[in-house]
Amino acid sequence: MSKPDATRQSSYKSNSINTQESRMRRHEVTVELRKSKKEDQLFKRRNITEEDIVSPLKESNNQSPANLTIDEIVTAMNSTDVERQFLGMQSARKMLSRERNPPIDLMIGHGIVPICIRFLQNAGNPLLQFEAAWALTNIASGTSEQTRCVIEQNAVPHFVELLKSKSINLAEQAVWALGNIAGDGAVARDIVIQHNVVDGILGLIGNETPLSFLRNIVWLMSNLCRNKNPSPPFDEIKRLLPVLSQLLLGADVQVLADACWALSYVTDDENQKIQAVVDTGAVTRLVSLLGSDEPSIIVPALRSVGNIVTGTDLQTDAVIAAGGLPRLGVLLQHQKNNIVKEAAWTVSNITAGNQKQIQAVIDAGIFTQIRQVLEKGDFKSQKEAAWAVTNTTTSGTPEQIIDLIEKYQILKPFCDLLDAKDPRTIKVVLSGITNLFVLAEKLGGTENLCLMVEEMGGLDKLEKLQEHENEEIYKKAFALVDTYFSNGDEAEAELAPQEVNGALEFNAGQSKTPEGGYSF
């Protein structure tokens, strides 16, 4: 039977590594990954250039509009003459479609936004509607202030209404605009959701949906799931989950990537939301996508899987049952450091679970890859691998912990991280080493563990850490040396902290390594 979630959380870390710190750690990693994934994900907001879209106007009007000034454009758009209106609107859109430095603020300052929104409602002239939608889409691709201008002029309900348009080009343009608006942040996203955009989206997806259109729809769905503080209203987002899960069965890289990102945002939350994703049957496909050749798919699929294993034991078991561990073992050897880091982070969350889950990690041979990461990985990956080891020493059985030392030869690369510059990593390693000594004491193997640690250079590192500027680190290091490596009262007196000018200082002494004892 699985442990209750609260029990698992309370046993997540031992000693000073408590539940609160594990939550802080999860948040820290999440923020770090959000920063890095901007390179892998489609842009949150996108300006549309001529090359991005097949305009229905290209067939009916091959001549470029005249080069008008902005004042002339606005005058033409305010004209009662339909042709002049269209000429002005198209000229404005073309200016806003420049790849570099489109004059968005200038256009806003000349009052173009309310005119465009008026044109959006002109159902009798779909070509004019299309040009107005395109222009507003590009305005909404700018800064938050520029996007807010489109929202405040009440464009959102008109774009949602256009999702029902019989013109597929116009409906797609509305999707693109809403994606830009929703991508601006939680407030803008919720405004889009409040205008029943989910109903509109669900009505657009079917077997006949063109691929380019489907890509934009899934990108919009991803932005609707994105951002926290607050999270999106889950009653609405939950309705998208079966569709997103179904989309994972496709083959298009862009669709798969954005569907995975959407699920990664949903699972980066409480267990109830993780369960809603699990209930759609998405876990098996997400795990399968970990074997993709495309980093743009691997990264969000891995992020989703990593989030799921932060949940309950049953949710973690779903990933293990789907074959997640062998996939993670492969990803720990990936050429991209950020993928190795996320894979190690995911493994660390699994080893924070119960002993059956730790055994599954051991049986999958993953600690061979963890050792390699500890030895040769980049520092951020090493840090996550260290968590995987310390979590195992916290929750594992004696046999499982001994496996780390004897079978997988983890101790030396683990101890080597005591030289790290990052205080939090040092604390993680110190906690893991403390756990090992507590176990060795129970098994009568303290002397042998002392010998192993000293032979690997660990004692020298511990003694050096007694001079560390971080108080928690030097106290932990002193406690380890004092408890397990001291040579009696004389050594205790030599190693004890001395008060100098009101501050504690430690003197590192030489200790004699005991021989014999229990063999790890």
Image: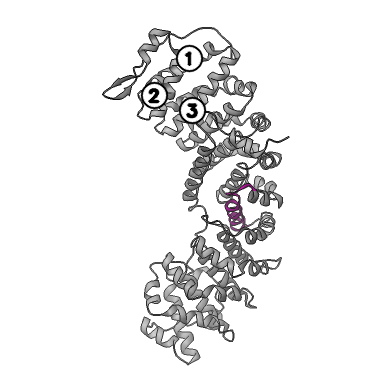
The percent position of residue 353, horizontal first and vertical second, equals: 63, 34
Q: Is residue 80 above or below residue 518?
A: below
Asked whether 491 or 155 is in front, the reply is 491
Toward which corner of the image does residue 262 lie, by quadrant?
A: bottom right
Q: Is residue 9 visible?
A: yes
Q: Secondary structure at mark 2?
A: helix
Asked if residue 261 is among those painted magenta in the image, a careful observer would answer yes
The quadrant holding residue 111 is: bottom left
- Name the mark on residue 429: 3
**Which of 55 and 402 lies nearest the eye of the viewer?**
402
Where is residue 78 shown, x and y percent of the image? Answer: 44, 88
Q: Quote the CA–CA distance across marks 2 and 3.
A: 12 Å
Between the residue at mark 2 and the residue at mark 1, the CA separation in whole angstroms equals: 15 Å
- Name the foreground residue: 234 vs 79: 234
Using the image, tell me which numbered label, if any, was put on residue 317.
none
Q: Nearer the viewer, mark 2 or mark 1?
A: 1
Residue 201 lies within the magenta run: no
Mark 2 or mark 3, which has the lower sequence index?
3
Crowding around mark 1 (Cα neighbors within 10 Å: few <14, some 14 to 19, many 20+) is some
Identify the residue shown where x is 62% and y is 74%: 168
Callout 3 environment at 10 Å: few (<14), some (14 to 19), or many (20+)?
A: many
**What is the residue that sits farthest to the bottom in this orientation?**
81
Given this view, does label 1 or label 3 mark the residue nearer the observer?
Answer: 1
Marker count (numbered):
3
Q: Mark 2 or mark 1: which comes first in sequence? A: 2
The one of 32 and 334 positioned closer to us in this rendering: 32
The disc, 1 or 3, on the residue closer to the chain's N-terminal end is 3
First to last magenta residue range:
252-271
Q: Which residue is mark 1?
A: 484
Task: Give the labeled residue for mark 2.
Answer: 465
Q: Quadrant of the N terminus?
A: top right
